[in-house]
Amino acid sequence: MKTFKTRQAIRKYLNEHPQLSVGFAPTMGALHNGHLSLIKRSKSENDITVCSIFVNPTQFNDPADLEKYPRPIEADMAKLESAGCDILFAPEVSEMYDDNEQWHLDIGPVEHLLEGEFRPGHYQGVMQIVFKLLDVVKPHNLYMGQKDYQQFLVVQRMVELLNLQVDMVMCPIEREADGLAMSSRNVHLSDTERKRALVLSKTLNYIKDHFDVSREAELEEQAMEMLAAEEGVEPEYFRIVDGKTLYPATPASTSVVALTAAKVGKTRLIDNVLIY
């Protein structure tokens, strides 16, 4: 695996291989099997697979959250090597951002729903860095995980609005054997909190099994009660929405997804399930 720290160096290398297709998985590190599934998918569909590790400061609302975000770079590099990743792009903040840099792209309501309500400005930061990374790597295919479902829609909308030449691929959620969605934040959970966190996937699966679009509001309320009943769990939202718009699902919706966010102890977790 080749590692690059500067935009110029990785761009020079990729320019030397213009005939090869490039798959790209942007990450913030603290890699787990969810991330590695993106690498595996990319390797099966592209000549070169690039992974970036960059803890992006502009998408954090809370400086303390940014500070404590795990950064096990040596372990991450070993995982990427074993997964067969071809290139790691791991720039410093100063390489990706100039002082007083401004960014805003109006993508409509999808930015302000769900996660947007609780993390204002978050998705502007996500779009800002993904745009920069795409401009550097110029991949044919962009691989992102279903666990950050709304993030995928946000980036998809940016790609459409800016007419970026990249195909987006959503990869399924990877889960632990007990159903917990894999997340870099899981390392912050105590053993007790980890068991309590299982209520997220259990509730999502219950709603999927009992889904009836005519009972949507009732099911959302029931789900919030199920989450709140678990000691040490503070639910923020549980929504059943149209998979394309994130507005409430209707009988006309061709895809429906249930999404939730909750604090387990001090750790904020998100999860979702595709109903159809």
Image (tube, rainbow, N blue to C red):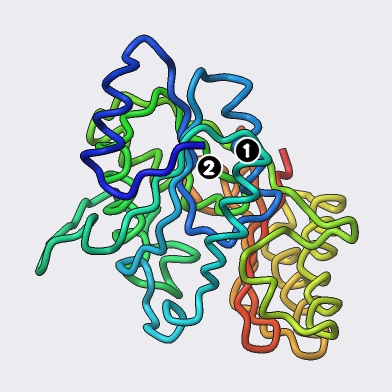
User: In the rendered view, does 135 fall on the left or right side of 182?
Assistant: left
Q: CA distance from mark 2 to mark 1?
A: 6 Å
Given the image, on which type of amino acid does mark 1 rest? Cys
Mark 1 falls on what kind of element? strand
**Quadrant including the C terminus:** top right
- According to the picture, the residue beneath numbered tag 1 turns out to be 171
Residue 223 sits above or below residue 135 on the image: below
The image shows residue 78 at horizontal and vertical percentages of 63, 50
Of the pair 231 and 256, the residue shown nearer to us? 231
Q: Identify the residue at image location x=60%, y=38%.
A: 38
- Residue 189 quadrant: bottom right
Residue positioned 31% across, 29% down in the render: 138
Q: Which residue appears farthest toward the top when viewing the image?
A: 19
Residue 250 higher or lower than 76, as above or below: above
- Secondary structure at numbered mark 2: strand
What's under tag 2, amino acid-wise? Met
The answer to whether the residues at label 2 and label 1 have Cβ atoms under 8 Å apart is: yes
Q: Who is closer to the viewer here, 106 or 245? A: 106
Instruction: In this rendered view, identify the residue nearer to me: 45 or 84.
Output: 84
Above or below, 115 relative to 107: below
Quadrant in which residue 179 is drawn: bottom right
Q: Classify 26 as above or below 28.
A: above
What's the residue at 39%, 45% (across, down)? 89
To which quarter of the image does residue 22 belong? top left
Provide the residue designation for mark 2: 144
